[in-house]
Image (cartoon, grey):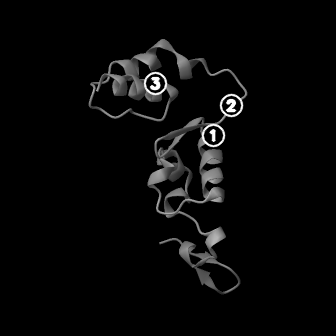
Amino acid sequence: RVTVSLQHRQLHPTDAPPYMRRNPELLSVEGARKAEDLGLLSLLHEPELLHALQVRFQEGLVYTFTGPMLLAVNPFQSLPELYSYERLREFVDLPCDDDVPQPHVYGVARDAYQGVWR
């Protein structure tokens, strides 16, 4: 349980007004790194979504799922390892019934291709 002290008053993240409520999952950098699908969070609103995207971007993670949608943040730099042949093979070599290992445009393409053949 995380609490914040504001001049002798204890607040829990869910005690705040709706526009200021926080997801316990996103209170740490590690939690934001693990939040690959923001659609699974207990609370999702625009500030939380932007916060999660910012933290994940700062950690070098430019792709994030929100339910079935893939969100991409432009890194404004070259990331050759993000689109390498080895990365592509990670998605191509997955068995048909396996979920994609992390959010990536290759995973979306793989799911679309698999959907055509079902």
Disc 2 and disc 3: Cα gap in Å?
A: 21 Å
Compare marks 2 and 3 and give the one earlier in the sequence.
2
Towards the viewer: 116 or 94: 116
Q: Is residue 13 above or below residue 67?
A: below
Q: Which residue is mark 1?
A: 57
Q: Are marks 1 and 3 in contact (CB under 8 Å)?
A: no
Label 1: how many Cα within 10 Å (few below 14, some 14–19, many 20+): some
Query: Which residue corresponds to the image point at 37% horizontal and 18% vertical from the top-left?
Result: 92
Compare marks 1 and 2 and give the one earlier in the sequence.
1
- 32 sits to left or right of 102: right
Q: Position of residue 8 (x, y in %)?
A: 66, 87
Q: Position of residue 13 (x, y in %)?
A: 56, 72
Disc 1 and disc 2: Cα gap in Å?
A: 8 Å
Query: Which residue corresponds to the image point at 31% horizontal and 24% vertical from the top-left?
Result: 94
- Secondary structure under the numbered disc 2 in the rendered image: loop
Q: Are marks 1 and 2 in contact (CB under 8 Å)?
A: yes
Amino acid type, mark 2? Pro
Towards the viewer: 64 or 29: 64
Task: Identify the mark at residue 109; answer none if there is no mark.
Answer: 3
